[in-house]
Image: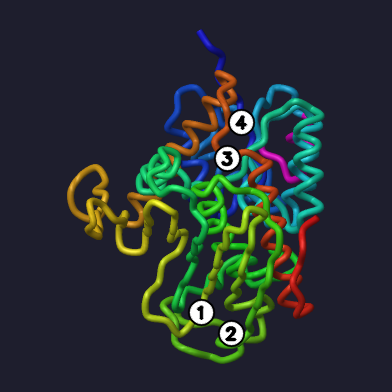
Amino acid sequence: MLKKLKIGIIGCGGIAVNKHLPHLSKFSEVELSAFSDTFTDKAQQAAEQFGAADAAVYTDYKQLLANSTIDVVHVCTSNDSHAEITIAALEAGKHVMCEKPMAICAADAVRMLETAKRTGKKLTIGYNNRFRSDSQQLHKVCRNGDLGTIYFAKAHAIRRRGVPTRGVFLDKDLQGGGPLIDIGTHALDLTLWMMDNYKPKMVVGTAYHMLSQNNEAARNGGWDPKSFKVEDSAFGMIVMENGATIMLESSWALNIRQEGAAKVTLCGTKGGADMRDGLWINGEENGKLYDKEILMEGTGIPSFDKVRSKSIELEMRVWLDSVLYNQELVVKPEQALVVSQILEAVYESAETGKAVYFT
């Protein structure tokens, strides 16, 4: 009988309690053995709700890493500590799933990747949108070559008035930015994955603090302009080494009618695809243009919560199998590093007003 993987959770806030723990607890192959948070009550509550009977609770994550029985660590902390904790966990001999984005800056992401390679431990990043049914289906279409060479794409991460005022989302020091690094990172990851193109050449970006400076109506009751320390929207144009172009759009607050987060539009030499209102493929066949909707499993339109839950469950299943059976990672740290490099370039270009070139 295969021994159970003992998992330690570092950071027991919303992303751990609402995403990681409910889904990890479904698998008989794992034991949620240790919990760490700077707020002891959060770690204790998570342990009581999801942990094994003898689960350990720590205030200092280093104590958790010193626990030699822990096989896998999930890093669910604010962005600024991703690199520090992940590197320490890898050095301690643990496999690591780190929440997105990989790090607050590209240099930290490089150190994470280098440490994973040196220690031989597995490292993946929590880009769960790859595991949605529409994402999985579109990825197959792209890999089959049905779209041909994809030379133009749009990465959509647009909310009209969806500002996350809870936690540390509006704190630039802890998060590194606003919607670009929070939800834009998902859309960019999906786009690069579909294109299978991880060689950027040049980036031009803009970032705005417009609607965030006013008290305006929002779905969650609005926000305090004084605490809004990050951009409310950001946009980028990425040119890849092979000449392909990606338009990246992200916002928490923007005067726009059509929303859509973690969606892509793809244009290739044989056909195109978009995910804005379902999954659609378009092209030309026998002298006629066509638009074809790719229907997912089941009937009707599943709720956002149901889609998200199913994608996270698959994300965790694939991750656990990669550790248990040494299977190939789906979200590779090398790929997540390129996402971080591009995001950083968008911010740099927005600040300097100049294009950022990759050498």
Quadrant position of residue 58: top right
Residue 160 image offset from top left, x and y in percent:
44, 78
Q: Split into 4 quadrants, where in the image is the C terminus? A: bottom right
> Pointers 4 and 3 in contact (CB under 8 A)?
no
Q: Amino acid at mark 2?
A: Ser
What amino acid type should be assigned to the residue bearing mark 1? Ala
Residue 283: image quadrant is bottom left
Tag in front: 3 or 2: 3
Q: Nearer the viewer, residue 133 or 17?
A: 133
Q: Which residue is mark 1?
A: 253
- What residue sits right under mark 4 in the picture? 7
Q: Which mark is residue 331?
A: 3
Identify the secondary structure beneath mark 2: helix
How far is the residue under mark 1 from the one under mark 4?
A: 37 Å
Instruction: Name the image colouring.
Output: rainbow
| Residue count near mark 1 (Cα–Cα under 10 Å), binned few <14, some 14–19, many ≥20 | many
Instruction: Give the secondary structure at mark 4.
Output: strand
Q: Nearer the viewer, mark 1 or mark 4?
A: 1
Figure check: 253 above or below 74: below
Q: CA distance from mark 1 to mark 2?
A: 7 Å
Q: Which mark is first along the chain, 3 or 4?
A: 4
How far separated are the C-alphas under marks 3 and 1? 29 Å
Contact, mark 1 vs mark 2 (Cβ under 8 Å): yes
Q: Which numbered disc covers residue 31?
A: none
Upstream in sequence: badge 2 or badge 4: 4
Q: Nearer the viewer, residue 323 or 258?
A: 258
Chain part drawn in magenta: 57-66
